[in-house]
Image (spheres, coloured by chain):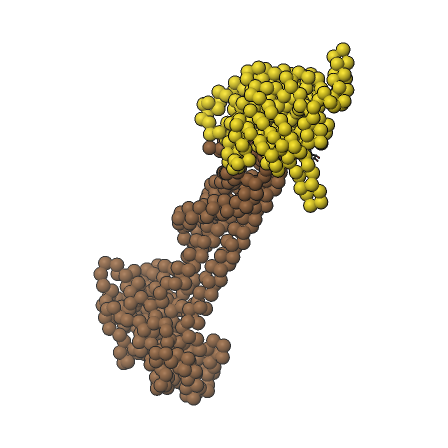
Chain colours: A yellow, B brown
Amino acid sequence: MLKMTHLSKVYRTEVVETYALRDFNINVKEGEFVAVTGPSGSGKTTFLTIAGLLETFTGGEYHLDGVEVSKLDDNARSKIRNEKIGFIFQAFNLIPDLNVFDNVEVPLRYRGMKSAERKQRIMEALERVGLASRAKHYPAELSGGQQQRVAIARALAGSPRLLLADEPTGNLDTQMARGVMELLEEIHREGATIVMVTHDPELAARAQRNVHIIDGQVVDLSEDPRFHAAHAAADQAHG
Amino acid sequence: MQIKPILAAMRHHKAGTVLIALQIALTLAIVCNALFIIQQRTARVSRPSGVEETDLFVIRSDWADKSDPRRIDAQMQADLIALRQLGSVQEASSTNSFPLRGTGWDNFIKLQPDQVKMTTDAAIFFADERTLAALGTRLVAGRNFTAGEIGAQQPRDALHSAQVIISKALAERLFPQGSALGKTIYVSMGRTPSTVIGITDTLQAHMTGSWANPYAYNAVLIPARLLNDYTYYLVRARPGQLAAAMRDAPKALYAQSRMRIINAKDGVMSFAQVRRRAYERDVGMAILMGIISVVLLAITAAGIVGLTSFWVGQRRKQIGVRRALGATRGDILGHFLTENLLIGIGGVLIGAVLAVGINLWMVAQFEMARLSLAYVVAGVVALLLLGQGAVLAPALRASRVSPVEATRSV
Ligand SMILES: Nc1ncnc2c1ncn2[C@@H]1O[C@H](COP(=O)(O)OP(=O)(O)O)[C@@H](O)[C@H]1O
Ligand SMILES: [Mg+2]
């Protein structure tokens, strides 16, 4: 589904070159639920933005669904984002001027879907996240957990095969975080491939596979002492 | 296609939306009327005088000694002989006034002697047998005055002229059913009948104010020299010799007699100058309206550029999110163009009503003509295009916002 080989990403400013990713290799298979962990600034978000075709990369190769994406033009990339990928951001990123219904509708409109089908999909997605009754509410009138559920509904409405989530629970309290996590697990069970960046070892532990990034590279978890420390902490928390 | 959510989102930036819509409305209302005024003034300025204007000029001679009308009469006849003898002069005639002069006599014209209200109003030109030739105006019916018919008129005496020549427009106004030739009219308040012996082709009156629009082509030629404090000479130069004739003529007049004043500034005026002076205010008004229109359009365009740029800056995150969710650059461009079009449509709807309102008010206040709806339609199209043009640069900037903006921290 998602395969990066020897991929690198360099941010160039006038004074410095930052290697956000270097010799980055990852292979996420169709239907996998992968949790990405790593310290702050290690390149997790960079990885997700490249995976989600939000940004180009500097070197290496990236095959998404068998397609080498660096050859695609901007419109083709937009189309793939629209049809194959669902995004869930840490800051929810709902459009404040639009109500819940209209927010969920955004990607469907860009797909040029007919009104009747849009409506059906929006209501299905909102029911799925338990917010059908809030369709006419504005984001500011909802709690953080509810906003993130709307964002998930927006990501789901287009039936994406790949769901990319960047610390989806980072701005939520534990209880809300658990609810969001359960929703993602449910979506995963229905066949979607999910890549989720998280700081929360407890949530990471619930994924099928963990990928750890340090300094822009995927590292073997068994060789990283920090991983064991984190796991020990999580185990203790579970008590 | 994206209209509904764009409209819905507008409620969240009402102030700016309303501001721009009102600015568009006001600009449309004013520009429509300004363009209409420009068109009206241009039409006035370019209407024909009925005079062969090239090679024609006028001289005003103010008499130094006004005590004896008979001497004035003799002097005028001597002046005319002197002018006609000049090599550069083709024709000369005396008159009190002429087309486009601005001021002069205009009088009630009646069809019955005891009529209280006027039938119409007309310019009074005191003329001789050479006046039509000097003006270059043809007769379309009847005959010209003969030298023997030319009398003398004291300014304070009642008009009593057995024969008159009238302009075509006046003839048609007075006798719409048949020819005016041979008919009787009453000029001024007098009860003396005047027989129409000739009808000229188009001949404009001296009045240029908009009040006189209905009478602009009404003129009556009276066969007399008006023995006033001053007289005008209408002088036609030989073809191509206007400058020479304008130099020679005042010299010839002074050689005749120095008991006169020919103003150095405007005592001698080519007809081109007469025309320019007559329409100075119209041209000035048209230019002013043009400047106002351009300034308003520029301010409106700048307002749209400014506000849209502000909105684009404010919505970078949201644009990034839309891009992340699958919007192409074209979708983002279309979003801002559509938004502007919707605001523009709101603005021009209000503006069209305002434009008609302003015009109706001017119709009532200043005898303006009714605004042609074509101007409103043209203004609407122009302002919508202006809006789209103004929004283009910021909208293109918006379309270049990277989808990665969606992931940047709040
Ligand atoms: N637009 C950018 N310009 C320059 N440097 C950047 C940019 N985005 C990220 N970086 C740098 O790349 C590195 C990885 O960042 P990021 O992927 O956001 O890390 P994480 O999400 O793991 O915290 C950091 O050093 C960060 O400062
Ligand atoms: Mg990050």
Looking at the image, can residue A76 be seen?
yes
Please tell me which residue is depicted at 60% across the width and 21% down the height of the picture.
A194
Q: Residue B387: x percent and y percent?
A: 51, 45
State which image quarter holds ligand 1: top right
Please tell me which residue is depicted at 34% across the width and 84% down the height of the picture.
B84
Q: Residue A208: x percent and y percent?
A: 63, 17
Q: Nearer the viewer, residue A231 or B126?
A: A231
Position of residue A68 in the picture relative to residue B44 (left or right):
right
Q: Residue A186: x percent and y percent?
A: 59, 15
Position of residue A120 in the picture relative to residue A210 (left or right):
left
Q: Is residue A118 above or below residue B401?
A: above
Q: Residue B395: x percent and y percent?
A: 54, 42
Position of residue B214 in the picture relative to residue B277 (left or right):
left
Q: Nearer the viewer, residue B269 or B339?
A: B339
Q: Residue furthest bottom?
A: B255
Please tell me which residue is depicted at 24% across the width and 73% down the height of the picture.
B143
Quadrant of image for the C terminus of chain B: top right
Q: Nearer the viewer, residue A117 or B161?
A: A117
* Numbered marks: total: 0
Position of residue A237 in the picture relative to residue A142 (left or right):
right
Looking at the image, can residue B7 be seen?
no
Please tell me which residue is depicted at 39% across the width and 79% down the height of the picture.
B242
Q: Is residue A50 above or below residue B71?
A: above
Q: Quadrant of residue A183?
A: top right
